[in-house]
Amino acid sequence: MPPPSLVFIGFSAAAYGQVHTARVSLDYMVRSHLTLAALATSAVPNLDVTQVREHTYHGEGDYLSAVLSVANGEEVIIRIPTSQTAETQQSADLLGLAALTSGARQSLPFRITEALGQTRAKNTRSIVYTYLPGYKVRENQITDDSTLVPSIAVTTAAIHRLPSKLVLDAGLPVQSSADVHEEISRLLARAEATRLVPTSVLNRWKNVMKDRQLWQFSTTVINGTLSAESLLLNEESEISAVLGWSGLRVSDPALDFCWLTSAPAHTLAAVINRYAQLRDLANPADLLRRIEFYTELEVAKWLLHGKDIHDQEIIDDAVAMFATLVDRITGDHSLDPDTHSMSVTEVQDLLGRVPANVSMRVEPDAEGILDDGELEARAEVEDDFAEEKNNATPQSPAGEHETVPVERLT
């Protein structure tokens, strides 16, 4: 099972016609740097490798990787997934990279890797990419007075300005605000059907869902999997490259900021304030509220993940986390427990044990677990948005849509 995340629509290998393979064992994987170099020359014709070095990479635990120096002075990186989860993510990442045309890449203030070729490696595949140098973000660097605040805002705003047509043309998911709202309604209905979510928590979440203003936002192109691990910095501690595009889609821009709830309390607000200026947002507070709301929903996703895989330990853990959430809500008796919203710091502290990447996607047959009363409860919060959803049409801003060459990746 993929590790849990704040992603509404996950990419599955089956959904995009990829071949499912069994979990790849390291016992069957090539380990030698020379073998990795040989695989790279097989994946990319005329690649003249002169040197190989070990490399730690984003998601390194699920990949074997090495950096290769080539005769023209440039460097490439080869990555081989070592699990089914990593292979599925790699397939989705290739789709995202292919969707980012040369025109789109030139409009961004940071670099994106390019997939150069692929070849088989036992029962999986190795992919060769252009290598992007840079420094990983350290946790203590993300403070409200650091150069990273404007850089994160500029980087995220640039992604959100990309034309939706890129995503449409690539056949990747496109959601309106009504679609986002409906999907969360389905998530909450599933969580409520477990009978394990405290009433005070459900009431507050339902009140958030009924706030019409909060859900009157414009969806944008989003990266969908942004995290500190996604970012590479230059010598000036500014973002120079963004890694990982497996979650590329059109959806709520708030989702690209959820990773920042692990930063100091004022940092997220500082980033949102700068982002709001760049995007000319009238109500940045609404964006911040949705970020906090999505973070709280991690507990519901963790509960449902436990239910889906029949793991009582996970279920018990989620129930304990709900108890902690209720204690924090009701701890301040001057606040209405049905409407009080926790601070970013409180939410992050509460969710410190929740793994990332549990999909919020609700499969169609999930409705079968709901009785009539629960279906009516979900319909109550969806009715006001039905007309908006029916009238919503994706925007397709003008832009260059030249296809990135990926012939060798088919």
Image (spheres, rainbow, N blue to C red):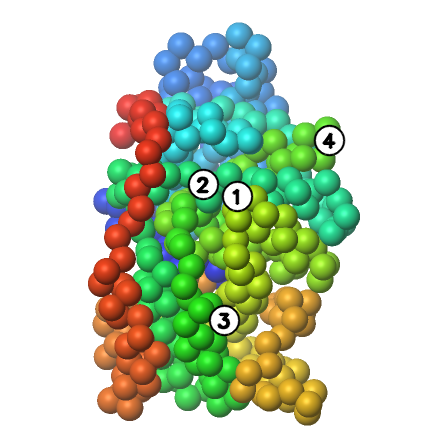
Rendered location of residue 147, percent (x, y)? 73, 40
In this picture, residue 230 sits left or right of residue 402: right
Point out the tag, 4 or 1, that comes first from the N-terminus.
Answer: 1
For disc 1, the marked residue is 157
Distance from label 1 to label 3 (Cα)?
Answer: 24 Å
Identify residue type, mark 2. Arg
The residue positioned 44% from the left and 13% from the top of the image is 47
- For the image, the number of numbered tags is 4
Dot 1: element? helix
Distance from label 2 to label 4 (Cα)?
Answer: 24 Å
Check whether the beta carbons of the residues at disc 3 and disc 4 lie within 8 A of each other.
Answer: no
Quadrant for the C terminus, please. top left
Check whether the beta carbons of the residues at disc 3 and disc 2 lie within 8 A of each other.
Answer: no
Depth order, front residue of 401/64:
401
For disc 4, the marked residue is 236
Point out the tag, 2 or 4, that comes first from the N-terminus.
Answer: 2
In this picture, residue 229 sits left or right of residue 224: right
Q: In this view of the protein, can residue 182 be seen by the observer?
A: yes
Identify residue type, mark 1. Ala
Tell me the mark number nearer the camera, choosing from 2 and 4: 2
For disc 2, the marked residue is 161
